[in-house]
Image (cartoon, helix red, strand yellow):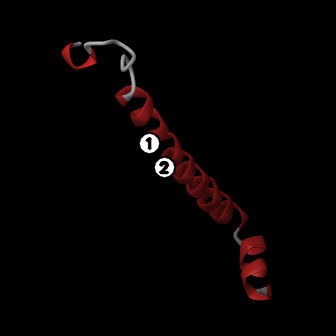
Amino acid sequence: MLVKGLIILKNKLYSFLNIVGLAIGIACCTLIPLYVQDEMSFDRFHDNADRI
């Protein structure tokens, strides 16, 4: 645990880029299914939704 902390402190830019990349990846994996679900549920309240 201590060694990992020292490596993170030693390579601050590299660690920062890795953490930002991980955060962006997790955010995309969360938002893409929400967007797809929203698009798939659009106009479902119409009686003839399958014809739109």
Residue at figure coordinates x 80%, y 86% from the top left: 2
Image coordinates of residue 42 in percent, x first then y, are 39, 21
The local crowd at label 1, few if under 14, some if 14 to 19, many if 20 or more residues have their Cα within 10 Å, is few
Q: Give the labeled residue for mark 2.
A: 29
Circles 2 and 1 in contact, beta carbons < 8 Å: yes
Taking depth in this image into account, of 29 and 51 the one nearest to the observer is 51
Total of numbered circles in the picture? 2
Q: Quadrant of residue 3?
A: bottom right
Say which quadrant the N terminus sits in: bottom right
Say which quadrant the C terminus sits in: top left
Is 40 placed above or below 14 here? Answer: above
Residue at figure coordinates x 25%, y 13% from the top left: 48
Q: Quadrant of residue 11?
A: bottom right
Taking depth in this image into account, of 51 and 5 the one nearest to the observer is 51
Image coordinates of residue 30 in percent, x first then y, are 53, 46
Q: Which mark is residue 33?
A: 1
Dot 1 lies on which element? helix
